[in-house]
Amino acid sequence: MQNYQSIKESLINLEKEIQEKISSIIDVEHLKELYQDILGKKGRITEILKQLKDLSPEEKKEIGIIANQLKDQLTVLFKEKQVELEKKEIQESLQKEFFDILRPIKNRVGRIHPLSQIQYEVEDIFINMGFQIMEGPEVELDEYNFGKLNFTDDHPARDMQDTFWTEEGFLLRTHTSSVQVRAMEVLKPPFKIIVPGRVFRYEETDASHENTFYQLEGMMVDKNVSTANLIYIMKTFLSTFFEKDVTVRLRPGYFPFVEPGFELDIQCLICSGKGCQVCKYSGWVELLPCGLIHPNVLKAGGIDPQIWTGFAFGMGLSRLVMMRHSIEDIRHFLSGNIRFLEQF
Ligand code: DAH
């Protein structure tokens, strides 16, 4: 009898104990351990039932019913707890590991390439002075790049501009001057144009040479255009661009398509002409070649040089950007290096 009572009590106590234990468990792993402890083959219920052997058949039957009910109840409790814990674990891992495939990797804002930024700025300054913008083809005919610009077939100046040729006999324009005669053919003088664009040279690359770079050609055709007009326009442009009064000087320079031809220097903006590293202690920085348009070029463009005159200049746009931002290597521009580009 004693035995029967104590077995019955331990079964009832077990139920309370398990209910408390289950409610404090926080993961599936521990829940499984507890299940084995209680309902497993060597679990506590099995242990308790082993003591039944000394009981009478009625007692055994009664305890058996209680034990089976307990097993069923506990099994339901474990199952419910397991579902609850698994739900919680899935939710936690979703929160931790959720990966939104549509989310941008990093909120990078695009920006305008430094060359384009300065190109637009220079364009605005010239537009304010009444210039219009023109474009021309990058794959060009020899005659526009050289012939009509007064480079005869055997002219040594052709060698100054190492050229990429296509198998069909076209070339990649070596300078934006190739658009000079194209413009003359379509515009009626007087006109003032600038031509920004990409040019190509078959060159060894280094910090100041690249096979692909940017120029900005300028040209004014009108009656009585003189070097004075050229100097005025250049000075106005440069003072606006550099936001200070710029002093310029002209030295003679040779290009077949201008006569006279010049190299335009500006007084060093860093030392105001006193001499520093940037101007190599000369006080002057070489900026762009220019000149008065050669009569042969005007003729090639169908313009009468007896009536019309003009000036032209060829600015290295890449070089201008390098000066503005103190960029030491021209190869950065087309390197596609985002860390370089993000600075501007
Ligand atoms: N096109 C020449 C070059 O790339 C530069 C040049 C010189 C352009 C004199 C001009 C000019 O318009 O007048 O070497």
Image: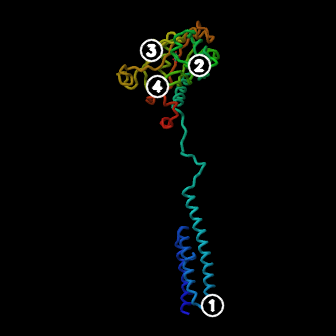
Label 2 CA crowd tier, 10 Å (few <14, some 14–19, many 20+): some
How far apart marks 4 and 3 lie (CA) works out to: 28 Å
Q: Is residue 99 at least partly visible in the picture?
A: yes
What amino acid does circle 3 point to? Leu
Q: Residue 120 got which mark?
A: none
Lower position in the chain sequence, tag 1 or tag 4: 1
62 vs 29, left or right, is right
How far apart marks 1 and 3 lie (CA) works out to: 126 Å
Lower position in the chain sequence, tag 1 or tag 3: 1
How far apart marks 1 and 2 lie (CA) works out to: 110 Å
Considering only vertical position in the picture, is 318 above or below 301? below
Residue picked out by circle 1: 57
Residue picked out by circle 3: 250
Where is residue 278? Give x, y as percent. 39, 25
Label 4 CA crowd tier, 10 Å (few <14, some 14–19, many 20+): few
Cβ atoms under marks 1 and 2 closer than 8 Å: no
